[in-house]
């Protein structure tokens, strides 16, 4: 038996829709990262981009456990004294709430060119409309996978 290594001709990409309403952020991000890499497929090859295209809707209604809403996200502008911060609650209530999910997924992927390529297959929307109906995406119900995936206030 020889070890199977996927080639670009062997790769089949699907479109998947995930509803993030009421789902815990970390659990959602780990499921999305697994789907983007293709680790859910039996023919997974680490050096190939064989993951699915993922559409996330209702990203503004994602849940955070504990006191994570008050945790700060820091970045630097590049200028002296240019450290800035925002809490996750401020980001979720702001203009681009989908960035919280995007950053969580990005940090769950390994760094490198392949991960940056795989992140281009992720589309995150704050509302329920996504405009990707022509791709005929399948619905992935994250809430029913485990009772720990959801949280009610």
Image: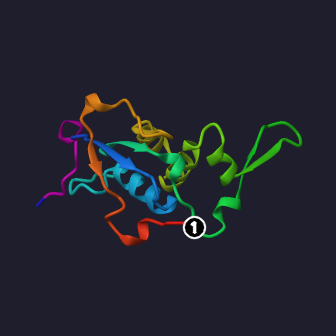
Nearer the observer, 71 or 35: 71
- Is residue 54 rendered magenta in the image? no
Residue under label 1, please give it.
65
Left or right, 61 with respect to 136, comes to right
Give the quadrant of the C terminus. bottom right
Does 122 sit above or below residue 153?
above
Q: Residue 45: percent from the left, percent from the top? A: 29, 51
Can residue 10 be seen?
A: yes
Horizontal side of 67 relative to 7 (left or right) equals right
Q: Quadrant of the N terminus?
A: bottom left
Is 48 drawn above or below residue 2 in the view shown? above
Q: Position of residue 146 (x, y in %)?
A: 35, 69
Relative image position of residue 21 (x, y in whole percent):
45, 53
| Residue drawn at 42 percent across, 44 percent down | 56
Give the residues in magenta.
Answer: 2-11
The stretch drawn in magenta includes residue 9: yes
Q: Residue at x 37, y 29 (%)?
A: 131
Q: Give the quarter of the image for residue 148.
A: bottom left
In this picture, residue 86 sits left or right of residue 137: right
Tell me which residue sits at (54%, 47%) in the image. Answer: 60
Does the magenta stretch mainly form a helix, a strand or a loop?
Answer: loop
């Amino acid at each position: 038996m020889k070890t199977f290594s996927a080639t670009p001709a062997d790769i089949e990409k699907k479109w998947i829709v995930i509803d993030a309403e009421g789902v815990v952020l970390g659990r959602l991000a780990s499921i999305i990262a697994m789907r983007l890499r293709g680790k859910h497929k039996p023919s997974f090859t680490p050096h190939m981009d064989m993951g699915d295209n993922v559409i996330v809707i209702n990203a503004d209604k994602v849940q955070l456990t504990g006191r994570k809403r008050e945790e700060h996200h820091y970045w630097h502008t590049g200028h002296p004294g240019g450290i800035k911060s925002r809490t996750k609650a401020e980001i979720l209530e702001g203009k681009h709430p989908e960035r919280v999910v995007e950053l969580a997924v990005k940090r769950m992927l390994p760094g490198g060119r392949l991960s940056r390529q795989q992140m281009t297959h992720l589309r995150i929307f704050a509302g329920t409309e996504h405009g990707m109906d022509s791709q005929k995406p399948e619905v992935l119900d994250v809430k029913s996978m485990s009772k720990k995936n959801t949280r009610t206030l």
